[in-house]
Amino acid sequence: MSHTATGSDGEVLRIFLFGMQGYMSPVLERLLADERVRVVGLCSGPPAGFIQRARAAAGLVQRRLRIRGRYDVVVRDPFAQCADPWRLARRNGVTCYSHRQIKDPAFAEKVRAARPDILLVAGFPRLIPPSVIATPSRLGINLHPSLLPRHRGGTPNRWIIRNGETETGITAHVLDENFDTGEILGQWPVMLEPGLSWGEAEHQILARLPDVVEEIVSNVVGGALVRTPQPQGGGEYEPPFHGAHAWIDWTQPFDEIAQTCLATRPKTGALTSIDGRRQCIWSVGTVTDLDAGSVAPGTILHLNAAGHPVVACGSGQALTVEKIVAYGEVRDSRGWRDFAVGRRFQTTFEMSA
């Protein structure tokens, strides 16, 4: 299908895209199918190699992450099923640029030479320089995966899940020289059911993106874009969600520990350690009839009828460790050799050790 045909008003909207696999893939797919649009360039990550493509076809994209040289953790890609934007773009005659070129002074001239009307950004991890922002004839638009001004930053939905919130969404805003501060062009809420993992929340966002992109294109072509300044206050920046945030604090109550597990899936699972050995906890369940208030948090109290370890946590509660990640797979915790009664998961871990 051609992506160079004119729309009903005779105009072809020239769009230059910025984004990585995941958010960019459904955006690119929708724009390539839109006869009102011509995609004139893509700045993204490098194309996936043969092994990654084969794993993606099987839904098994993952990599091994060595934590402090001691413990291998399998990291799953929540966007494994998304098309590789480089391959998709090249197949349709779109010129591709590496995201590493963004700071090259010559890159702005390459973008300008493509004569874009719009810069459209989705899931791009780097701040776009002012020289590039100034290249389109109309404006730059960023698609941010939260309802701004709340949850600015690069990993909003991991924090939304970690905080136990039930609403996220997509905000289209004018691209400016700061992260996520430009005038709002539209917002699309996405409700989250309790118990949803970070990866599942991201897939709900991905499912909405094509319709959001189509609405934005319609508003640009029809001259119906409305700019609304972001409200003052409540515009916090979330820090990057990295390894230190994935560690379980066993002094916290069950709900917070459960949300930590959900915020780390489908990547590593929540991290903890026992006798210096790292463990990855995939899921936990509640124990409602046990008073664990006098026991040190993290202590394995006993095994329940199903064979799962029952562990003391904060607020006088106890929980069950139901599933773990071991040897690259999500496994049942029953019979796991490290989970003996009386042993204790560490509440904190010395990351520099």
Image (cartoon, grey):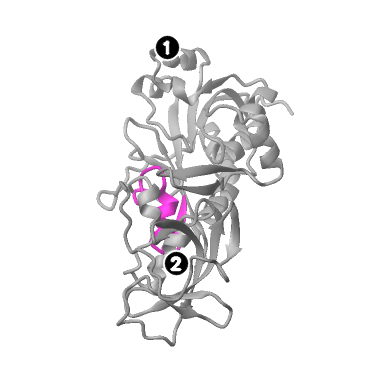
Identified by mark 1, the residue type is Ala
Which residues fall within the magenta stretch? 148-169
Helix, strand or loop for disc 1: helix
- Count residues near mark 2 (Cα–Cα under 10 Å), then give few for <14, some for 14-19, many for 20+: many
Please name whichever residue, 34 or 220, is drawn nearer the observer in this view of the structure: 34
Describe residue 158's horizontal placement relative to residue 179 as left or right. right
Task: Identify the residue under disc 2.
Answer: 258
Helix, strand or loop for disc 2: helix
Percent x, y of residue 170: 47, 48
Looking at the image, residue 190 lies above or below residue 69: below
Q: How many marks?
A: 2
Percent x, y of residue 161: 44, 59
Percent x, y of residue 262: 48, 60
Q: In which quarter of the view is residue 347 placed?
A: bottom left
- Name the residue rendered at 25%, 51% in the picture: 233
Residue projecting furthest to the left: 233
Q: Please tell me whether residue 153 belongs to the stretch shown in magenta.
A: yes
- Viewer-nearest of labels 2 and 1? 2
Please name whichever residue, 314 or 73, is drawn nearer the observer in this view of the structure: 73
Task: Identify the residue under disc 1.
Answer: 106
Q: CA distance from mark 2 to mark 1?
A: 48 Å
Q: Is residue 7 visible?
A: no
Looking at the image, residue 15 lies above or below residue 197: above
Identified by mark 2, the residue type is Ala
